[in-house]
Image (tube, rainbow, N blue to C red):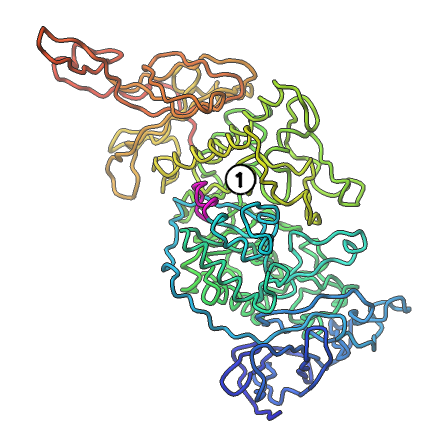
Amino acid sequence: MRISEGKPYPLGATADAKGANFAVFSAHATWVDVCIFDAPDGREVDRFELPEYTDEVFHGHVADIGPGSFYGFRAYGPFEPEAGHRFNPNKLLLDPYARAHAGKLVWDPAVFGYAIGAEGDDLTFDELDSARFVPKCAVVDPNFDWHGEYRRRSVPWDHTIVYEMHVKGFTKLHPEVDEGLRGFYAGLGSKPVVDYIRSLGVTTVELLPVHTFIDDSFLLDRGLRNYWGYNSIGFFAPDPRYAADVPNSLREFKEMIARQHDGGLEVILDVVYNHTAEGNELGPTLSFKGIDNRSYYRLIADQPRYYVNDTGTGNTLNLSHPRVIQMVADSLRYWVSEMRVDGFRFDLGTILAREPDGFRTESGFLKAVGQDPLLAEVKLIAEPWDCGPGGYQVGGFPPGWAEWNDTFRDAARDYWRGMASAKALAPRLCASPDKFNFRGRKPWASVNFIAAHDGFTLRDLVSYNDKHNEANGEENRDGHSDNRSWNCGVEGPTDDPPINALRWCQMRNFLATLILSQGTPMIRAGDEFGRTQNGNNNAYCQDNEISWVDWRLDEEQQALVQFFRQLTALFHRYPVLRRSRFITGGTYPYIDVKDVTWIDANGSEMKPETWDNEHTRCFGMLLDGRAQTTGIKRRGSDATLLIVFNAHHDVVKFRLPLYYEAYGWTRLIDTNAPVSPARKFRGGDAYRATGRSLLMFERVPILTATTGGAGRAGRLVPVASRGEAAFARGRRRELEPCRHTSVSLMF
């Protein structure tokens, strides 16, 4: 092979007309070899040293190496664990910038940089060659014909509904997907799947991790696998396990993205830039640890043999190092520019903003992302917590970011199980302005959810008081024990009709609370029809029917899907449900309108003593469509809606407020009667809100037919609740909404 100096950028392996350029960063290695293999599990056929070193990057160009070639690195340097260095050239290393991987990891002692079982543990130097037991990198052809894909049109944040799913689990049992494509990228891009997702009214598919990841040895020993994928070992390559055509996994992933875009859907990725699969000092040497351990990982300052473990996984990526920031930023840009994804959800996102002195909103990584023009075009969602000190940071991310809002989840769960009052729920219905209303952030910054991948499904939330994770092989010790769930009287499945009816109603209550609240709703795939994991709230290792979506839907499940579609249709129809300004309960003085008025069961505005009563379980949220919608000081022209929440166990006669002369209310939603037709009511009517139900009404004119004289056509005359004489004289006067001397709840 003819070798030349090549270039230090771009990093990784880059094919060109004459061969391939290889470049890898290491601040502490003495030299780096590239090893070429004839197959992912084949033999090494060539090896060459990268001849040049520029700005801490080893690089070289090799002729006659092109797409389809398999390779790995060997890095030479000091093996001094107590100083943070773990170089061992006996270990074949994955390229941190590899665009594709092939082969599987075999958990052999050779994949560890130290001699397992020897005295001194990780301080010993292992001489076994790991090449036969580790995956290989592949040089790729980046070209892909995106012809025929619609130009990407990002969904505005205030129209977004996120749909969280697993690539394999969503289609593995899907009867309308070709059997050979089930569980793969191609299956997720198939027409039946895209059509179904689009029919739900959701806009944005969020995929659990698809970066190449590793199955943990302790799981394989139990006959299990890392199903969720939060164990990354490469940040540029789609995991080949999800490819029906493994040699063309990159192309298959791009085809899936194109088909989702054809269906008008966005795709965002759940990404894990907080740690890697290499674990702590006793973990394997697969990539970063062998290339430059001291640069890539956070090490304990006065004991660099050991790793900072703010992630709970054994190690933490060092997002204070400029080259690590570069790697993550390059990865994000690659997935946007080359793979055409529409955004990211950052697992344990607090890690990304950590500096040695803790979480900082002006961290190097957040600054790098905040100024990037390409990343400014896509959605960025943080999981705003980690396991380290000061790790809980809900509301702490800077403008431009959205965040998972667990305070919404917890308040909604507690309210509907009768453990939280109206005062606890109200701010969560308003996109949690106490958390997010600063620095010009918008309500969409609050990503609301009831259930996500890590926890009970929606159906299990109303069917189990306790977790049932025995299948995980940890004697039910794993997973959260505090789920804020309520089984409605019986643990698990039951044939009791009243309990089952209550459970389905509770699921409708949760879905309606989620979709009708301000903020960005996110639903877990399958919750729209009540899928179950039989009480397992930590199915991270269940690559089987526990986690796979079961598409055999009974009548109740089909009805819940239709109800969910009804909710999303209302979400898209009524802008007042997705306002671009935080609602606070305050009055806009120049238009004399409140954006939200809180109503008690008597139809009056809530008083302080009612708010402070912890037993207040029934209340209304009146969203005034006349409220200012933008920074321009003028009245809005949206519909006015009333949402009634009743978590009381019995019927409450809720008096519909007298809001305007000649106006009443049309019922749009009653979770206790989900298929009932729309019906009109007058202001002042007492509506029987059944126990544990949610209602929604729209303010509408109330018209009644009267008969004129003989030969004259009947005419429609508005019926006013009061002031009919004034109306008849043409003085159509708006009544002030629920004027009282009480103080409304404001955020």
Quick check: can you spot residue 554? yes
- 453 up-or-down from 114: above or below: above
Q: Which residue is mark 1?
A: 449
Query: Could you say which quadrant of the image residue 504 lies in?
Result: top right
Q: Residue 260 or 430: which is nearer the viewer?
A: 260
Quarter of the image where the N terminus is located: bottom right
Q: Is residue 666 left or right of residue 365?
A: left
The verdict on residue 64 being magenta is no
Q: Residue 198 or 48: which is nearer the viewer?
A: 198
The verdict on residue 203 being magenta is yes
Q: Is residue 609 left or right of residue 640?
A: right
- 521 up-or-down from 327: above or below: above
Q: Residue 680 or 306: which is nearer the viewer?
A: 680
Name the outermost residue toward the right.
Answer: 119
- Residue drawn at the location 57% of the way across and 58% of the way down: 352
Residue 315, position in %: x, y?
70, 60
